[in-house]
Image: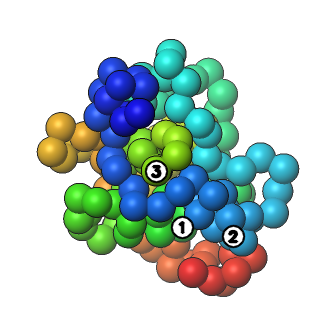
Amino acid sequence: MSAVHRHGRAAMKITQRSAFAKRLATNLYDGASPPLSVVKPADKHHEVDWWTSDNQNEGPDSLRHLAALALYLEVAKHSKIALPPQCFPASFDFDDEEMRPDKGVIKAFLEHRLIEPRMMVAQLVFDVTPDGQAYLARRSGDLKTGL
């Protein structure tokens, strides 16, 4: 079943199975809470306001956040629709399930201006800002493994 039928809106098609992203997440970060979530019917991940509506406050300085940004950018390279460098979608429609970035991670990145939202081909995507690119460059050596 396509993502349109699962959740009412189209998601960015990724030419991989979700196991690819889960394995990559584990390679980048071995903590207890991977920075990917299965999309739930109540999620409004195609609306920018939904990403910042969580009361949870977190900063972008953890290893989990760093690994998350590297993960999202790597998964985006497998999008059926070519995305510009330093850009990733608000949801990933894998061959077997639809997943999305972690809401708290995206909120922190938006609040610290490491990413900016925009619409592309009727899809919400996030562009890594120059500050976000500097964050990645400065901290890339902290990742458990390289990409």
Label 2 secondary element: helix
Which of pointers 2 and 3 indicates the residue nearer the eye? 3
Marks 1 and 3: in contact by CB < 8 Å? no
Q: Does residue 22 show up?
A: yes
Q: Which residue is mark 1?
A: 70
Mark 1: few/some/many CA within 10 Å (<14, 14-19, 20+) = some
Query: Which residue of the protein is positioned furthest toward the front in this rendering?
Result: 1
Checking the image for residue 28, the label placed there is 2
Checking the image for residue 95, the label placed there is 3
Marks 2 and 1: in contact by CB < 8 Å? yes
Marks 3 and 2: in contact by CB < 8 Å? no
Query: Which residue of the protein is positioned furthest toward the right in this rendering?
Result: 32
> Which quadrant: the C terminus?
bottom right
**16 or 52, which lies in front?**
16
Residue 130: where, in percent of width, then height?
34, 67
Report, in whole angstroms, how far the alpha carbon at label 1 lies from the one at label 2. 8 Å
Report, in whole angstroms, how far the alpha carbon at label 3 lies from the one at label 1. 21 Å
**134 or 49, which lies in front?**
49
Mark 3 or mark 1: which comes first in sequence? 1
Amino acid type indicated by mark 2: Leu
Mark 1 or mark 2: which comes first in sequence? 2
Label 1 secondary element: helix
Residue 54: where, in percent of width, then height?
57, 23
Amino acid type indicated by mark 3: Asp
In the image, is 144 to the left or to the right of 78?
right
Amino acid type indicated by mark 1: Ala
Mark 2 or mark 3: which comes first in sequence? 2
Residue 91: where, in percent of width, then height?
42, 42
Query: Which residue of the protein is positioned furthest toward the top in this rendering?
Result: 42
Residue at the spot 70% in from the left edge and 81% down from the top edge = 145
Residue 137: where, in percent of width, then height?
51, 79
Residue at the spot 52% in from the left edge and 46% down from the top edge = 96
